[in-house]
Image: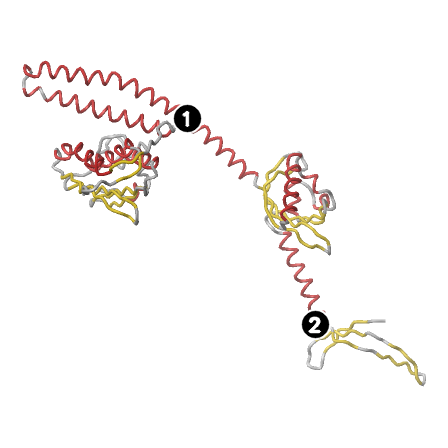
Amino acid sequence: METEYRIKHKNGRWIWLHDQANLISEKDGITHAYGVFTDITSRKQMEQELRYSEEKYRLIVENAHDGVEITQGDKIIFTNTHFAEMLGYTVDELRNTSFMQIFTEKSKQDLYSRQKKREADNMSTGSYETTFLKKDGMIIDVDIKYEIMNFKGKPATFASISNITQRKSAEKARERALIEAQGANKVKDQFIANISHEIRTPLNSLLGFTDLVKQRYLEIIPEKDQKVFKYITDAGNRLMQTIDSMLNISQITAGVIKAHKQELDLSSTVAQAVAKFKQQAESKALVLRAVIPKQPTLIYADEFCIHEAISHLIRNAIKYTKEGTIELMFGHKEDRTTLSIIDTGIGISEEYQKRLFDPYTQESEGFTKKYQGLGLGLALTKHYLDLNNIDLEFESKQDKGTTFILIFPKI
């Protein structure tokens, strides 16, 4: 009979011995015992470490925040308490039962399809989202991460399961809110388009008849009263520009405005824009100039978009510059043409730079805002440039000035 002994070594250390023979014989009336001993201390230590390791991992799995289960075939052979509680069962109720009982009909079909694909691709690990059926009939969303492994000599699937029902509900709520917001934006854009049309038509008549009255009666109106015509024209043009901006931002947002690209001479477009705003800059004693290359600077873009983008940037530079210069300079970044609009204006605070291209925003807002306008110029500029795949960079320091850089794609 084989026996194992734990004895104390001469040096004081405990060791394990395995007696393979344990023979007993009698001689001269005395019973003698004989043994063939093997030192099995190392094996015993390994067994003890293995038991400790198994107990440690059992505790980790049992106390894991996520559900853990092991299946062989369609049978659940192990589950931790968290997974059972997630589904409203006890551990004993789930153990050795069919894994299919916790799947909804739809998730079963998804599982079959996924298993076929996994086998075809020879995948041993993966993750997916599905739905489980709780004991009380409720359906929950879960995220499963699995690995095919060997368990007690047979193939098994080890899975970690997270309950993501709250996250899924939040995602659906966000989707509904987004759809509602998009619907509200469409209503808003339609309203703006309609109101813009209704205002523009009588405003055109007002400006037209004002000009007619000015031509007919200018000579008989006292000189001090003639400036009234300028006030009417300036106010009317400002209102017309505001309406155009509102209509354009609505049309761009709705995808109505499309870019019709063609080969253009950027030098010519810049020269026209500078000439257009020259008088406005001079009225504020500002120097507006452009360094125009002698040779044409060819780009491939929509003429209306480029003209409007440059015009908005020049107009903004004039509005926010009290003294100094506004300069337009051509350049290159790597192999791409660039146009810089540099001013010595009030600059943009770091805090507002994050919202710089948001429509209907200005750094100075409210009833006491310092500058006129709806805050659509830069939003429109960004949209016009995006339609033409033109990058826009800027640098700004308060009380120092701002530089906007348009970077055009290669032709």
Question: As shown in the figure, which amino acid type bears the numbered disc 2?
Answer: Ser
Query: Gap in Å between the C-alphas at discs 2 and 1?
Result: 75 Å
Considering the image in quadrants, where does the N terminus appear?
bottom right
The percent position of residue 402, horizontal first and vertical second, equals 23, 43
**Residue ranking furthest to the right:** 29
Disc 2 crowd rating (10 Å Cα; few below 14, some 14-19, many 20+) is few
Question: Taking 98 as reference, is 254 left or right?
Answer: left
Q: Nearer the viewer, residue 91 or 249?
A: 249
The percent position of residue 283, horizontal first and vertical second, equals 12, 33
Say which residue label 1 marks.
Answer: 184
Say which residue label 2 marks.
Answer: 42
What is the secondary structure assignment of the residue under circle 2?
helix
The percent position of residue 264, horizontal first and vertical second, equals 27, 36
What is the secondary structure assignment of the residue under circle 1?
helix
**With respect to residue 191, does 262 lie above or below?**
below
The figure's colour scheme reads secondary structure
